[in-house]
Amino acid sequence: MNIKLIKNTAKQKLTGYWGIAIGVFFITLLVSRVAESFLFILAFFFISSPLAVGYQWFHLAIKRQQNPSIETLFDGFKLNYFRNALTNFLIFLFTLLWSVLLIIPGIIKALAYSMTLFILRDRSDLTALQAITESRRIMNGKKKDLFVLYLSFLPWFIIPIVLIFIGIVSIAIGADTVNDGVYLSGMASLIIGYITILGIAIYLAPYITTSLAVFYDDYVKPSEGSLIQNPLPSTHNSAADHIDLAKRVE
């Protein structure tokens, strides 16, 4: 896997879409925060989940040069709404359960489930659990590659983190020694660090998600007709079948 190629492709695909991509990021953030401010679980299921689906679909459309618009962000509500809401909720639930055991298994499972929302876009015939299972299958042997891709974005935060650290230390020293100059310089460093992180986050949000879309489309997406090699139980099967299927997904 060529990380540099993935990131360069993502930036190339984002050309002409940076403004709308940043706007989509803020809309997603705002709606999700408002939804999470009351009745968290219900809001997450009915609002944040399909919105997260639409957010990834938007960046997949950028990668495929399908001329996405703000309306694309809300496709998760318009197309198979309950399947989309259930899928993202299950991803959250399974990842949370694994994270309760240990942090590392939670990270591994998050990487394994990472392609699920893209699969929902390409395979409207799959159920929520089938899409999650398919993501696990195509990410088999590829989780390390995706983890390295994510790590490649960390250097962006080194400078602001250093500024914040210097600011905190300077504020502590200034307060302890009653030195206004050191205290004020620490406050300035802290504020600059936080503003820098905010600016970087605004830039990286569409960059990372589009890179994820490139990773899916060009590196792990199966050829047409190869999805779900072993058909899973349909939504009309018995409760016992669903319990067995959930165990397989986890």
Image (tube, grey):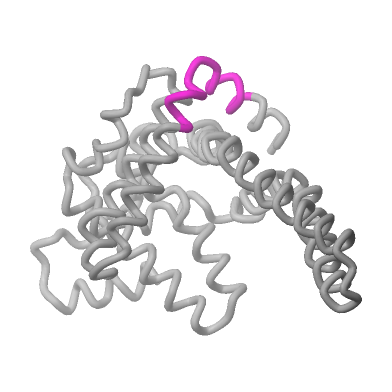
Residue range in magenta is 9-22
204 left or right, relative to 133 = right
Q: Position of residue 35 (x, y in %)?
A: 28, 58
* Residue drawn at 76 percent across, 50 percent down: 160
The overriding secondary structure of the stretch rendered in magenta is: helix
* x and y percentages locating residue 138 in the rendered image: 48, 49
Residue 83 appears at what percent x and percent y? 20, 53
Relative placement, left or right, of 191 versus 25 is right
Instruction: State the residue at coordinates (37%, 19%).
Output: 66
Against 77, is 22 above or below? above
Per the image, is 15 magenta? yes
Which one is nearer the viewer's eye here, 110 or 45? 45
Say which quadrant the C terminus sits in. bottom left
Viewer-nearest residue: 187 or 211: 187
Look at 11% across and 67% down and name the residue there: 237
Give the quarter of the image for residue 249: bottom left
105 on left or right of 144 = left
